[in-house]
Amino acid sequence: MARCLAFMLLVLISSLISTVGLPVEPPAELLQLGDVAGGGRLSVDASDVREASRDFGGLARAEPVAVFQPRGAGDVAALVRAAYGSARGFRVSARGHGHSISGQAQAPGGVVVDMSHGPGAAARAGARALPAYSSALGGHYVDVWGGELWVDVLNWTLSHGGLAPRSWTDYLYLSVGGTLSNAGISGQAFHHGPQISNVYELDVVTGKGEVVTCSEAQNPDLFFGALGGLGQFGIITRARIALERAPQRVRWIRALYSNFAEFTADQERLISLGAGGRRFDYVEGFVVAAEGLINNWRSSFFSPQNPVKLSSLKHHSGVLYCLEVTKNYDEDDAESVDQDVDALLGELNFLPGTVFTTDLPYVDFLDRVHKAELKLRAKGMWEVPHPWLNLFVPASRIADFDRGVFRGILGGRTAGAGGPILIYPMNKHKWDPRSSVVTPDEEVFYLVAFLRSAVPGAPESLEALSRQNQRILDFCAEAGIGAKQYLPNHKARHEWAEHFGGARWERFARLKAEFDPRAILAAGQGIFPPPALVSDS
Ligand code: FAD
């Protein structure tokens, strides 16, 4: 009965939106909806609407008419069915944790589904699915709600069997559905692949409002389409995540290079080491100015316990490159970890005397960026605009990229970049070619991430940083670098077609027509023309 009521109310909303058109002030009928017993809640509270209108990037702002707070997949399906069945359709966007840069989770004039609600909330009260073992899959897994944050997944699986997901992002306060709609990458990706390579099964609410279970064997088009699919084919309401036994501790090492070719040769050698022998568990790196050596998010390493007294660096000016690696271990293996680390480091060509080591619990390592977040929040520097640019660059052109961008456009000064610049390679064979994510056509490619903050009053203004992004993109295009945007942000249809490339674009458009024929979902990505704005009517 309650479900029926919820559905009828949703149909009412959809007909209001589609036939009458909502004025700026929501009509009384909409305001009266309030809580729907046993189902989702449609909120028009100013604070909910305001929150759903913004994101981490702070560059785009678009108001939905309402924010939907589901209690489960059935509620999400009812909302999408209402949008699909309405005369004109209306936009529906899932919002994970709002960590997009350019409005990708927004639904101008439509409804934002706040995925932080859902069974995740009930699960926090004790009804969450336990990790399980599958002999068919050959390992452990856990089923989680699509709006769950990775940090909560980690805490849950650790406390139930000492298990943890295998593949990560650097920051854990991102939602499962949000990162699976992109790829989800960090320094483990060279070995485990991105997060989308570590999922066994999904429940997806398609743009027709159907809840479809999919996997490699069952509805594979939807499964692989949704992985890296930028939310275009459905809303992920459940994901079956692969788990491994969690190590207890991490040896975390950084070492500096002045020679880019040596830096990338060492990174590429490290990611080529196979599972059987000695290898690091995480390989990343970043670009750093010799005169600074401290960058705002990652400075804790070069702390009073680890002072930067690098006499070997006094002749260096301009850009340095910092390799960042880790070795996981259990307390029982503490002795052998030293031998493994020494042997691996012994083959690398970093600058003598520039190795910094720290040792910490595994969870603290995984959650490292959160500490920086808290510091930035305390200074009011988390809420500033973030004109980030993330690129995948083929390994064969990474030296050209260094010359043209780090030494060229940035002029050897990372200070002008407005934040950290990450650079690390990955192995393409760990990425399933059937997924929707786009990567360069080479076995090894790099993530280069410009994690910029436009702090008011700083010389690196939003305009200056955005201009620099455009210069980098122009350089890549003119030099034929073959780079692809990660967390892509394109404006025109032909840019999206070029981003995906011939056959992949055709497939993407075909899946859109099949699973979201009215282009209701994730219109904030700006890929397919969405239903007209309510106010257009
Ligand atoms: P949102 O921004 O809310 O949504 C992103 C897109 O996915 C939107 O189009 C939305 O409609 C869609 N979506 C959301 N939930 C669902 C769902 N359940 N089903 C279908 N579609 C959905 N990325 C990495 O890969 N590695 C990193 O190390 C990394 N670090 C980051 C650190 C910070 C501080 C920030 C802000 C971002 C970082 N990211 C990283 C980027 C992150 O992966 C993206 O922002 C991603 O969008 C996840 O954020 P979110 O969960 O808040 O999703």
Image (tube, rainbow, N blue to C red):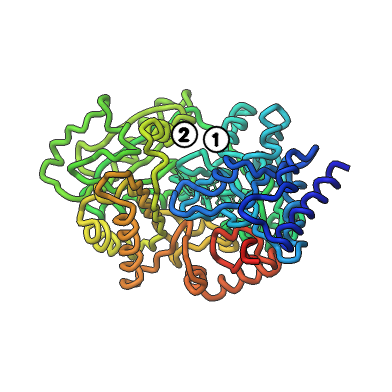
Is there any visible trace of residue 278 in the rendered image? no
Mark 2 beta carbon near ligand 1 (under 8 Å): no
| As drawn, 162 above or below 113 | above
Horizontal arrangement in the rendering, residue 469 relative to residue 105 (left or right) = left
| As drawn, 132 above or below 183 | above
From the top left corner, tell me how far across and down residue 347 is, in percent.
Answer: 29, 44
Query: Closest to the observer: 187 or 97?
Result: 97
Residue extending furthest toward the left: 315
Horizontal arrangement in the rendering, residue 258 relative to residue 14 (left or right) = left
The local crowd at label 1, few if under 14, some if 14 to 19, many if 20 or more residues have their Cα within 10 Å, is some
Label 2 with label 1: CB-CB less than 8 Å: yes
Is there any visible trace of residue 429 in the rendered image? yes
Horizontal arrangement in the rendering, residue 353 relative to residue 208 (left or right) = left
Disc 1: which residue: 151
Give the CA separation, mark 2 to mark 1: 8 Å
Q: Quadrant of the N terminus?
A: top right
- Which residue is located at x 39 percent, y 63 percent? 394
Label 2 amino acid? Answer: Asp
Where disc 2 sits, the SS reads loop
The local crowd at label 2, few if under 14, some if 14 to 19, many if 20 or more residues have their Cα within 10 Å, is some
Horizontal arrangement in the rendering, residue 171 relative to residue 455 (left or right) = right
Disc 2: which residue: 367
| As drawn, 52 above or below 509 | above
